[in-house]
Every structure is written in C-alpha cells, then in structure tokens.
Amino acid sequence: MQKSGNIAIFTDLDGTLLDHDDYRWDDARPAIERIHASGIPLIAVSSKTLAELNHIQQNFGLFDGLIGENGGVISLGDEIEQPGPLPQKIDDAREKIRAAINVPLGSFRTVSPEIIATETGLPLDDAIRAGQRHCSDPLIWQPSEQDIAIATDIAAQFSLKLVKGGRFHTLCGPSNKGAAMTRMIERLIAGGRLNDAPSTTGTDDANDRDSTAKTSSITTIALGDSANDIPMLAAADIAVQIPPKRGTNTDPLLTHPDLRIAPYPGPAGWNAALQSILDHITNTNKKSEVLHG
C-alpha cells in the first residue's frame, strides 16, 4: 500500500455499487457503514444525471459528493460546476450522427420518459430524472461497428466523445470521470475534508527502514466496471474492477500498478474488495506505528 493517510473513495454506480438488474446496494451495506464510521469521503461518479444522483442521495444519504454525466457535472455541498459541454453542442452532434447512419437513433434527450423506462427498466419517475441531461446524451440505437465509427468521427468534429458504458454509448464532452475525480479532490481539500499536507513515512523494506520519503497523505480508491470508468481507475492510487454479472470475462480494463479484480459482481464484490483494502490499510498503519512511531 503506497499511502496510509487520508482516504477518498470514488465509485461508479450501475453494475458496481448498484446491482446491474435491480439497482439495489444492500450487499454493500457493511463496507458503506464502515466507510461512514471512519469519516472517509465516498463520492458517486456516474453517467447518471445530477437529478438522479440527488434523488439517490436524498433517499439513502450514501455520498459526500456527486459527479454526474461521466464527469460533466460536479456537486459538493451547495456548489455545482459543469465542466461538460453546453446542451446545444450535444444536440447538434447527435443530429448530424442521425443523418449519417443507417439505423434509427433516439437518445435520452429526445425520447419520452416511457421509452427511457423501457430501455433501462427504471420506474417512470426515475426515467424522468434520467432524461434531465445537460452535458451528455446516451444513444438509443442498434449500431453496427461502422455506425459506431461514423458516430465517433462526428463526435470528434464537435470536440465531443462517444463513450461506451455498461448499457449505452454516450455522447459527451472531453471531461471524464478521472478529471472530475481530480477536481473533486481539490474541492475536498479546500473544504477541509481531506488534508494534503505532506507526511514523512518510513518504509517496510528491510533495506530502507532508515530512509524517509515525502508523500501526499491522500490515498484514492476508485471502483468501476466498464470502459467509461477507465480514466477514473487510472487516476486512482488503488483501482478496483468489478466483474460482470453475466459471463466470465475478467480481462483487465487497464494496466495499473495496483489493480484489483473484485471477487464477485456488483455490490457484493464492491463490499468484499473495499473491506479487504481497508483491512490492509488499517494493518499497514498499525505496523507503521510500531516500526516508526
């Protein structure tokens, strides 16, 4: 474990903290209670809208901060930032894509809440919140590889990206979950939730026990299950990949010096992975106190 000071946890939702099918998080409750008891900031980082995230937060009080629309909007306390693109740019790019491909194209910004509910399995009220998008737009289509290539090229013409998530290709800006995570850390430090003062720590290596190194005191942990989580996982000190609920493919999403593959899909894997990591950090801290205290 590289660091043993302050900790911040950043998590994707669908397929990661929330079950892929029923959106429940019950199996993650033990780790969440431990995180809350330890005063560790837990940040939701999702393709969901701020309206959806606020609704989850109002009902369950799980998070200390919210990052929505794949990093396009950041909410902490009463302050909201939108690094993502303006809605008009998203709409212009989508309409050009629609004209260029050979399959019908809908999107969360253009279809009715009833269609969103059908496509996602969400209740109608949740589907309404899912459609309240400001800087990204999940596409509803059945594309060929050629369609995806065309859409990706057109998105780039508008300085946008087409990002594949767990269920949808989403048209969004250059902002991503990793950049938003970095910005959220800055805001947590500014708000006093994290302390980035350098700390002097010894090492456990027998050859280096008399040496010290100045390091940041913050350890970042990120958890995700799909391609749109890669920037967030890459930016974290510890990256946790949640395996798919169906299928056996657990190929790493990225190369990372401390990548963990959770032992189970969804919230059960989320819980197990974080409990193990927090146990390791706790044991490392205790050992450090004995060796260097």
Image (tube, rainbow, N blue to C red):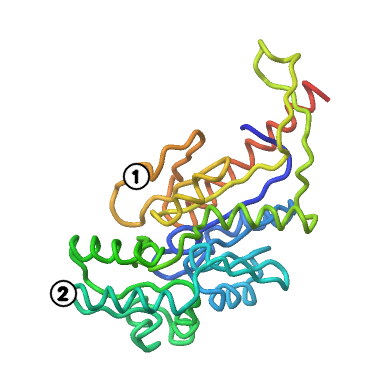
Q: Please name the residue shown 54% across and 56% down the image.
A: 11
Residue 62 rendering spot, x and y as whole percentages: 64, 65
> Of all residues shown, which one is farthest toward the right?
293
Disc with the residue nearer the chain's start (1 vs 2): 2
Question: Where the C terminus falls, by quadrant?
Answer: top right
Residue type highlighted by circle 2: Asn
Asked which secondary structure carries label 1, the reply is loop
Tell me the residue that label 1 is attached to. Answer: 250
Residue 77 rendering spot, x and y as whole percentages: 72, 69
> Of all residues shown, which one is farthest toward the top?
207
In this rendering, the answer to whether 10 lies above or below 132 is: above
Between 278 and 92, the one lying in front of the other is 92
Residue type highlighted by circle 1: Thr
In this rendering, the answer to whether 233 lies above or below 70 is: above
Between 125 and 49, the one lying in front of the other is 49
Asked which secondary structure carries label 2, the reply is loop
Tell me the residue that label 2 is attached to. Answer: 102
Residue 110 rendering spot, x and y as whole percentages: 36, 85
Residue 175 rendering spot, x and y as whole percentages: 50, 60
Q: Please name the residue shown 19% across and 60% down the image.
A: 145
Separation of disc 1 and disc 2 at Cα?
33 Å
